[in-house]
């Protein structure tokens, strides 16, 4: 059985997220998805709009996802080793960066291949947040 792993916040779930999960599932028998816990989102200097419990339930309910697990830290290599994953799936915005070139070497040494999928053009959680902030004038009290 070929296991694949990907991870993300999955806040403001959009078609780009779905495309990545669909493409990833096409390359493995079992797709495990790490969903970033709220504490780690905050550590990265961001704030999710949707609470972790809701985000993981949304991801868990997608037909391409075989299992959704909490992501408590940024160590994707350890997560892949623990799960027995052969592939780590990520967006191609990371491709070619110094950090990810180093990751490729480390993952290869562990027998894990990093697969980069193209980002869906014109959509991202960042763009959705920017649009919402502009529409609401930075006042998000109506959504709480």
Image (cartoon, rainbow, N blue to C red):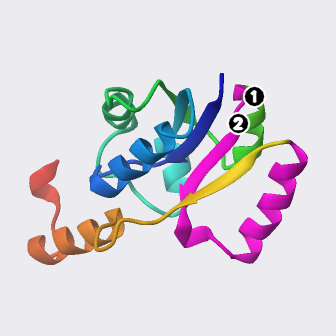
Residue designated by label 1: 82
According to the picture, the residue beneath numbered tag 2 turns out to be 79
Q: Is residue 53 left or right of residue 137?
A: right
Mark 2 Cα-neighbour bin, 10 Å: few <14, some 14–19, many ≥20:
some
Give how far across and how far down residue 1 sits, in percent.
Answer: 66, 21
Number of residues whose C-alpha sits closer than 10 Å to that of mark 1, classed few (under 14), some (14–19) or many (20 or more): few
> Please, what secondary structure does the residue beneath circle 1 have?
helix
Q: Is residue 99 above or below residue 57?
A: below
Q: Position of residue 59 (x, y in %)?
A: 37, 34
Q: CA distance from mark 1 to mark 2?
A: 5 Å
The circle on residue 127 is: none
Instruction: Name the element at disc 2.
Output: helix
Nearest the viewer among 25 and 135 is 25
Is there CB contact under 8 Å for labels 1 and 2? yes
For the point 34% across and 47% down, the residue is 18
131 lies left or right of 93: left
Residue at image x 63%, y 71%? 95
What is the quadrant of residue 94 in the picture? bottom right
Work out whether residue 53 or residue 60 is closer to the camera in this orientation and state it: 60
Q: Can the viewer see residue 36?
A: no
Residue 104 within the magenta-colored segment of the rendering: yes
The magenta segment: 83-110
Which residue occupies the foreground of this view, 72 or 21? 21
Q: Furthest residue to the front?
A: 26
- 79, above or below 45, in the image: above
Name which quarter of the figure residue 21 lies in.
top left
């Amino acid at each position: 059985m070929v296991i694949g792993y990907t991870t993300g916040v999955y806040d403001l779930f959009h078609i780009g997220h779905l495309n990545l999960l669909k493409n990833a599932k096409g390359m493995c028998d079992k797709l495990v998805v790490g969903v970033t816990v709220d504490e780690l989102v905050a550590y990265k200097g961001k704030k999710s709009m949707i609470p972790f419990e809701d985000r993981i339930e949304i991801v868990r309910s997608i037909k391409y996802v075989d299992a959704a697990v909490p992501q408590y830290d940024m160590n994707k290599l350890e997560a892949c080793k623990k799960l027995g994953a052969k592939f780590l799936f990520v967006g191609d915005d990371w491709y070619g960066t110094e950090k990810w070139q180093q990751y490729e070497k480390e993952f290869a040494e562990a027998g894990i291949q990093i697969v980069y999928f193209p980002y869906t053009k014109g959509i991202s959680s960042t763009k959705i947040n920017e649009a919402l902030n502009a529409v609401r004038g930075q006042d998000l009290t109506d959504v709480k």
